[in-house]
Amino acid sequence: MKSVCLLLALACFGSVFSFSQTETCPAGTEDMLNYFVMGYPNRLSNYMGPGNANPIYSAIVPEDGSQFATTGYFVWSKSASGYPWDVKSFDSKYVYDRTTELSWTDPTSFRRFTRDLPMTVRCVTIGKAGRAIKVDASNTSYSFYTNCQAYQTSPLNYVLNELSAPSTVTTGNLGTITARYFRYHYGCDQNYANCTDMEVFSLGYGVGLYDWKHYVAQNGKWQSVQDSIINNQQPGQTVPYLPCSNSYQ
């Protein structure tokens, strides 16, 4: 009965896009959503567990089974309660960063970009790196929210996003997988250099996020701040808890 209730909840969660159009990448390219979210049907009953950090539960709206819609969003929930979370959006051109938690205990507090920030091109040539994306500082503003209301806006300065070519890796209980590495540089100068921070997302094909690293620049070199390993697939699922519609819509 519990699994039936969960499937019904997930169906209701995605019902707003129930008449979605599916996206087909051109020949010779592949859809990057295959790397950002766990594959179907595994994501309905499994999640990525630690490692040494929080878990990652993948949910996508609309839920179109083995296909992906042209537009929508997906959620990486970081606990079995459905919060905290990251919300990413997508369309036919890009995968975007939209929202992340502010407090790990208050789902009405979060940070959201004023304009969704492009992370990677949606359809990337098979076997090749994605095109680097440079985002001008004027398009990287984000707001802080509490009780679902914005109260402060800050810039992320210039942003440089890079996606690696795929490679074969062995990790956790996943065995051998195909992975790409998304590198998120921010706090950069107008030449997209001298960035203050870099986050590295390890993304497995049909797996989703299985490792996250954060670096800060010190004396011209990257210094590791945190490495969150999330590389063991385990049974279980949750429904994202999103009490503020402006955190995901």
Image (cartoon, rainbow, N blue to C red):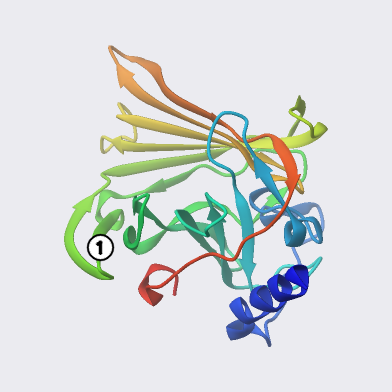
User: Which quadrant of the figure contains the N terminus?
Assistant: bottom right
Judged left or right of residue 7, residue 60 is left
Judged left or right of residue 91, residue 103 is left
x and y percentages locating residue 91 in the rendered image? 57, 68
Mark 1, residue position: 145
x and y percentages locating residue 203 in the rendered image? 65, 40
Residue under the image location 74 percent in, 41 percent down: 233
User: Which quadrant of the figure contains the C terminus?
Assistant: bottom left
Q: Is residue 222 above or below residue 90?
A: above
Residue under the image location 25 percent in, 63 percent down: 145
Q: Nearer the viewer, residue 217 or 86?
A: 86
Q: Nearer the viewer, residue 127 or 173?
A: 173
Residue with the most extreme bottom position: 19
Tell me which corner region of the image, top left, top right, bottom left or bottom right, holds residue 8. Answer: bottom right
Q: Nearer the viewer, residue 170 or 35?
A: 170
Judged left or right of residue 174, residue 181 is left
Residue with the most extreme left position: 152
Q: SS for tag 1?
A: strand
Q: Is residue 124 above or below residue 189?
A: below
x and y percentages locating residue 136 in the rendered image? 31, 50
Residue under the image location 59 percent in, 43 percent down: 55
Disc 1 residue crowd, few under 14, some 14–19, many 20+, Cα 10 Å: many
